[in-house]
Amino acid sequence: MENTGPVLGLDFFGRQQLRKVDVRFDVLSPHYVSMCFKYTTPVVTTAIRLSGRPSIKWYTFVTIAKPNHDEFSLIVSKAGDWAPKQIKKPLTKIC
C-alpha cells in the first residue's frame, strides 16, 4: 500500500489558504470576457491561478492592473473546457 500522508497533508493545508473572491464578468464579444476583481492591485507581470473546482483543475491567467485602485482584470477567451462555461454562465465568486 502506498503512503500518501504527506501529499494529503500538503493538499489539506494548501486548501486552507484558498479564499473565494467576488468577480464581475464583462462580456466583450461572444468569444471574450473580462473578469474584474476588486480586492488588490497586483504588480506588473503577475499571473494568477483560478478554479471553480480547486481539487480538480486550475487555470493560469496574466493580470491587467488598474493603477491607483485595488482592482485588476484579466481577459478570458473561448477556448478549452473551462472558459466557454464561464462565458455562457459566469460565476459570482471564484477561488
Image (tube, grey):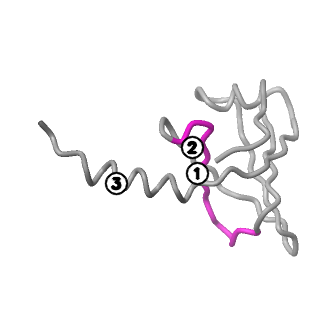
Q: Residue at x 82, y 59 (%)?
A: 38
Q: Residue at x 48, y 39 (%)?
A: 55
Label 3, secondary structure: give it. Answer: helix
Q: Residue at x 15, y 40 (%)?
A: 2
Name which of mark 1 and mark 2 comes first in the sequence. Answer: 1
The span shown in magenta is 41-54
Percent across and percent down for residue 22 are: 79, 49
Name the residue beneath numbered marker 3.
9
Percent across and percent down for residue 17 are: 54, 59
Name the residue beneath numbered marker 1.
49
Instruction: State the CA–CA distance, disc 1 to disc 2.
Output: 5 Å
Labels 1 and 2 touching (C-beta < 8 A) = yes
Q: Main secondary structure of the magenta part?
A: loop
Quick check: 77 above or below 24? above
Number of other residues with Cα within 10 Å of mark 3, as a class: few under 14, some 14 to 19, many 20 or more: few
Number of other residues with Cα within 10 Å of mark 1, as a class: few under 14, some 14 to 19, many 20 or more: few
Name which of mark 3 and mark 2 comes first in the sequence. Answer: 3
**Kind of residue at badge 3:** Gly
Label 1, secondary structure: give it. Answer: strand
Label 2, secondary structure: give it. Answer: strand
Q: Quadrant of residue 31?
A: top right
Name the residue beneath numbered marker 2.
59
Which numbered mark, 3 or 1, is in the foreground of this view? 3
**Kind of residue at badge 2:** Tyr
Q: Residue at x 64, y 54 (%)?
A: 19
Which of the pair 12/34 is nearer the observer? 12
Q: Is residue 77 magenta?
A: no
